[in-house]
């Protein structure tokens, strides 16, 4: 396997809060291979967006580091060399809030071009970017209020591509859009990935979407990584009770899809508050397989099968899983 384009080592992000500390990201390791789509999945409060913001340099980690193309990535965006800033871009969840309403599409796209390309052939590059995301060039003179939600997101994608990045963080890029528009945005993103050789960190709560677009899936829960596997292996053989709970809750429309789901796992209790995490495994109050050790010892993330990691006391290091379907 080639060297990863990015790795995270022992990443923590703690936020001080009244009454304690919020451990938004807690001892997270990850790696991303060049050209892949890594799906980072979890419920609200799992830490997935905080992880994305650390990659972007919005939040410096409390501890740990990120390595990008073999070099340590400065923790704050303002401290990063210009080339690193060009190489890593982000598409945000809500296109309406990520675009300045007082700037036309052309002006929105010109900003990164003028900063990073010395102003050369800026107008032509704006037209190229619009064509790249399948928008007519006449949209260059429109303002955000004149665009639909999907069109705004396509402009946001074009802006992220303006600096010719190699890695793009996609933070719930379709969740704020109508269902009828979501498929078009996903199709554009996947076409651009192949055409431009991009690497995606795709942050989402939608596991059904990850089945179709990701190469690997990383499940987070209350700041920790709970399971990581190649997408096919992940859906064929989910291991962590939290993962199985999420998968068993996915809506399906055919009997074949229903048969492929893991056995229904009933969640017990509520997700813990960020300031009141239980000792041991933080999922233990909701887990139907909870054991005494789960209430006192947080399990390590272990490779329990080739390229399949899980942190659960159900699976000792020597465990050899049997596929469920």
Image: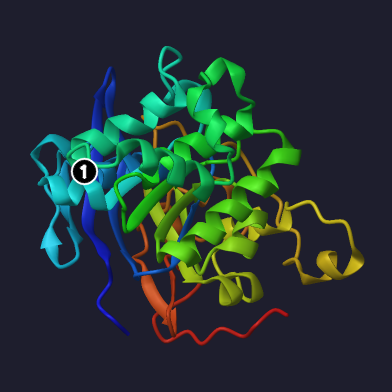
Name the outermost residue toward the top: 102
Q: Give the percent coordinates (x, y) of residue 307.
A: 42, 80
Q: Quadrant of residue 176?
A: top right
With respect to residue 105, does 266 lie above or below?
A: below
Relative depth, front residue between 79 and 26: 79
With respect to residue 276, does 291 lie above or below?
A: below
Q: Residues within 10 Å of mark 1 (few under 14, many from 20)?
A: some
Q: Is residue 105 visible?
A: yes
Question: How many numbered callouts?
Answer: 1
Quadrant position of the N terminus in the picture: bottom left
Q: Give the percent coordinates (x, y) of residue 203.
A: 47, 48
Q: Quadrant of residue 98?
A: top left
User: Label 1 belongs to which residue?
Assistant: 117
Q: Is residue 42 visible?
A: no
Horizontal side of residue 169 vs 215, given as left or right: left
With respect to residue 51, does 4 lie above or below?
A: below
């Amino acid at each position: 396997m080639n060297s990863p384009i990015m790795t995270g080592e022992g990443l923590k992000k703690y936020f001080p809060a009244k009454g304690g500390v919020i451990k938004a990201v807690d001892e997270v390791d990850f790696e991303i291979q060049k050209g892949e789509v890594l799906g980072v999945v979890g419920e609200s409060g799992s830490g997935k967006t905080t992880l994305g913001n650390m990659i972007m340099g919005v939040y410096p980690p409390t501890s740990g580091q990120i390595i990008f193309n073999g070099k340590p990535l400065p923790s704050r965006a303002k401290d990063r060399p210009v080339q690193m800033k060009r190489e890593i871009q982000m598409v945000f969840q809500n296109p309406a809030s990520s675009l300045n309403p007082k700037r036309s599409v052309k002006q929105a796209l010109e900003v990164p071009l003028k900063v990073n390309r010395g102003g050369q052939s800026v107008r032509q590059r704006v037209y190229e970017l619009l064509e790249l995301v399948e928008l007519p060039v006449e949209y260059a003179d429109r303002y955000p209020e004149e665009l639909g939600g999907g069109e705004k997101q396509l402009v946001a994608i074009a802006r992220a591509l303006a600096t010719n990045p190699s890695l793009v963080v996609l933070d719930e890029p379709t969740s704020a859009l109508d269902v009828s528009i979501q498929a078009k945005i996903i199709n554009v993103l996947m076409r651009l990935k192949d055409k431009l050789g991009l690497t995606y960190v795709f942050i989402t709560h939608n596991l059904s979407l990850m089945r179709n677009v990701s190469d690997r899936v990383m499940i987070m829960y209350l700041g920790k990584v709970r399971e990581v596997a190649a997408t096919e292996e992940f859906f064929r053989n989910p291991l962590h009770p939290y993962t199985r709970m999420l998968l068993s809750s996915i809506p399906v429309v055919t009997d074949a899809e229903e048969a492929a789901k893991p056995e229904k796992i009933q969640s017990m209790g509520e997700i813990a508050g960020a300031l009141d995490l239980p000792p041991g495994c933080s999922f233990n109050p909701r887990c139907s397989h909870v054991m005494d050790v789960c209430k006192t010892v947080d399990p390590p993330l272990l490779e329990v099968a080739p390229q399949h990691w899980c942190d659960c006391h159900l699976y000792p290091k020597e465990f050899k899983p049997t596929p469920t379907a």
